[in-house]
Image (tube, helix red, strand yellow):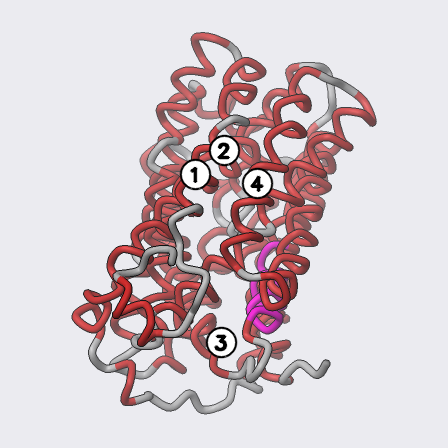
Amino acid sequence: MRIHPTVLLMASAHMVVDGYGNIYAPLLPLLIPKLGLTLAAAGTLTMLYQMSASVAQVGFGHLADRWRPRLLVMAGPIISVSILGLVGIAPSIPLLAATLIVGGLGGAAFHPPAAALAHRLGGSQPGLAMSVHITGGTLGFSLGPLLFAPVAQRFGLAWTPLLVVPGLLVIAFFLSRVPPIPLHTDSIAGFGALRPYARPLSLLYLIVVFRTLTSLAFATFVPVMLTRRGMTLGQAGAAVALYLFASGLGGLFGGPAADRFGARRVIALSLVLSTPFLLAAPLLSGWLFLTMLALGGFFLQSTLPVNVTFGQALAPVSAATVSSLMMGFAWGTGGLSAPLVGLIADRFGIESTLVGLACVPVVAAVFALPLPSSTNGARILREGGVVR
């Protein structure tokens, strides 16, 4: 079971990009009093970041299918790391919003061409290759709080720009080894080529939206919930890091499981299994809380690489565009719910809100049932993208 070295390279870069992409939520307990943020305003800022980091991937994915994907893979991480490191020194809410938006665009430029390249290099095990690539990002996202929260707690928010340095050093190593990324003739057609596959791709899209809604709400508001219970910023960051680390392990498991048992089965089952653990977590404390949260994250995020790989297999055209729809546009749509989640949490409490959101993955699982069991493009066209 050999992984192409370029897939490992992309996974490492993905780790850095998504690690710095999670600098905002761990710092929220300090940013809220500094800037006078309500939970609804904090959720709105999360939405703005998700819109730029995720929804913008659709445009960058379309561009990567047609023009210089290697340039996007190289420039995106530099912009993301350099700008997001300034989050702690933003003196006002509008400038914090601008920092999140610009930094998010850097990540948006990187994701579609990197995911498309990982899929192409996956050979006979595309699920494994995508799992490795996406798990790199998820692990970076999980480790971010362990770096950002302790530094900000000990030295203050003014020191966050210094955190740019280690990220840029890793990126410099990555940039010197980015291989040429040729354009493929089957990718030039862009969105038009996806029309025959609209039904199965729409179902996958809805699954990702509902999963993202749940995952993002837990990642954003659990640190605030824990600090209000008396934990330090570092302890809350460590708890969220454990949740996200378990989520990354779930992603590493999901791809190979889909290669063996079928994507539809893995998607539906993992979403259903995540619900009881996420449902119990906000009602508990201590190690029992951490265990339930981690297990919920493990099952919830095991669908992440499966959705991307399944989408690319169902519609074997416009690889970067499909990646941007499954990773970016769907994630961004899920992120649109963040202000509403914050508003509900302001009124009913964070615990009650998270308990309600824990049931959302079951809704996502329902959308997996009509998905085709085959990933053969010709068969999907004949059967209209429904189960036979």
Q: Which mark is residue 83?
A: none
Identified by mark 2, the residue type is Val
Q: Residue furthest left?
A: 192
Magenta segment's dominant SS is helix
Q: Position of residue 58 (x, y in %)?
A: 28, 61
Which residue is drawn at the image coordinates 63% and 84% (left, top)? 4
Question: Left of 332 or right of it: where is 19?
Answer: right
Q: Earlier in the sequence, mark 1 or mark 3?
A: 3
136 falls in the magenta region: yes
Give the residue number, with chain letter if any, for mark 2: 362
Q: Mark 1 falls on what kind of element? A: helix
- Secondary structure under tag 3 reads helix
Taking the spot 33% from the left edge, 88% from the top edge, the residue there is: 183
Note whether residue 50 is visible: yes
- The reply to whether residue 165 is in sight is no
Residue 343 at x, y percent in the picture: 38, 17
Magenta region = 127-138
Query: Residue tagged by mark 4?
Result: 158
Q: Amino acid at mark 3?
A: His
Quadrant assignment, res 388: bottom left
